Image (tube, rainbow, N blue to C red):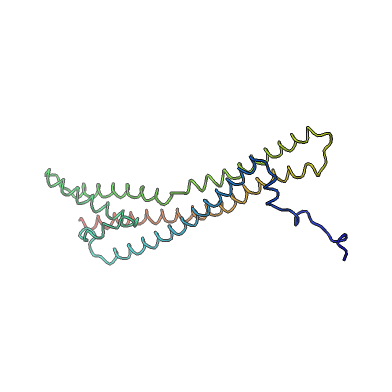
Amino acid sequence: MPAAFLPTSPVLGMNIIHIFTTSDTVGQIIVVGLALFSLLAWTVMLGKHFELKRLRFLNHSFELRLRDERSLLDLPESFRQRRSIPYADLFADAVESYWRAAAIGKEKGRDSTRARLEHAENALQRALARQSLRYESSMIFLATIVSGAPFLGLLGTVWGVMAAFSAISVQQSASIQSIAPGVASALLTTVAGLVVAIPSMFGYNFLLASTRRLITELENYASSLADRIELESE
């Protein structure tokens, strides 16, 4: 078939690199910034996913070890030196506070089981809050990218359209050939913003669900740990 009769498609002929190079400085800065945000978002999402997966495995392994022990309060100090494991951090704070309250109570002659348990429960609450913040770290960064990337893309689009019409206003006549490059450059920033925001939104929702599940498991563990300490102290 002669080349003159071959169908042409503006979509297939679209060259993203060409559109980027013909964009103005503001548009190029926004696209490059969004590309960097996309790289950071993927790095944070993958890193957070594997971190939560690792912590969940370590938590369950530590919990299984505690189940095999008959007494938590008399365990060796090695069990309280694994602060990198959230469950171990809660255990260490609770036991150390329990025995610290016992030592202070004996010195002052006011030692009581109730005071020991109150100190252990307060320590559990503090450790629970600290580990919850650890689980939720980096989530604000992802939420910011999800909400901010489309607006950066919209900013680039509005700026590009404004620049295109400003250039047309100084010409004697306007045609689709003169308008199209400026509009295409403007819309490129919108596409870049959506390409960043959409994967980040799915990743954020997935990680948020995983974080909430781990926090619920942490709260349940803290409750069961407090019950075991109370039973052993009676």
How many tags in the picture? 0
Q: Position of residue 105 (x, y in %)?
A: 15, 46
Q: Position of residue 106 (x, y in %)?
A: 13, 47
Q: Position of 51 compared to 35: left or right?
A: left
Q: Position of 158 compared to 168: left or right?
A: left
Q: Position of 184 compared to 41: left or right?
A: right
Task: Please name the residue shown 46% across and 56% down the image.
Answer: 47
Above/below status of 167 relative to 46: above
Quadrant containing the N terminus in the rendered view: bottom right
Quadrant containing the C terminus in the rendered view: bottom left
Q: From the viewer's side, name the closer residue of 229 and 99.
A: 99
Task: Please name the residue shown 23% across and 52% down the image.
Answer: 96
Q: From the viewer's side, name the closer residue of 157 and 114.
A: 157
Quadrant in which residue 183 is drawn: top right
Quadrant in which residue 231 is drawn: bottom left
Task: Please name the residue shown 58% across and 54% down the image.
Answer: 199
Q: Residue furthest top?
A: 170
Task: Please name the residue shown 73% across and 53% down the image.
Answer: 14
Quadrant in which residue 164 is drawn: top right
Q: Position of 205 compared to 191: left or right?
A: left
Q: Position of residue 205 (x, y in %)?
A: 53, 53
Q: From the viewer's side, name the closer residue of 19 and 116.
A: 19
Q: Position of residue 16 (x, y in %)?
A: 69, 52
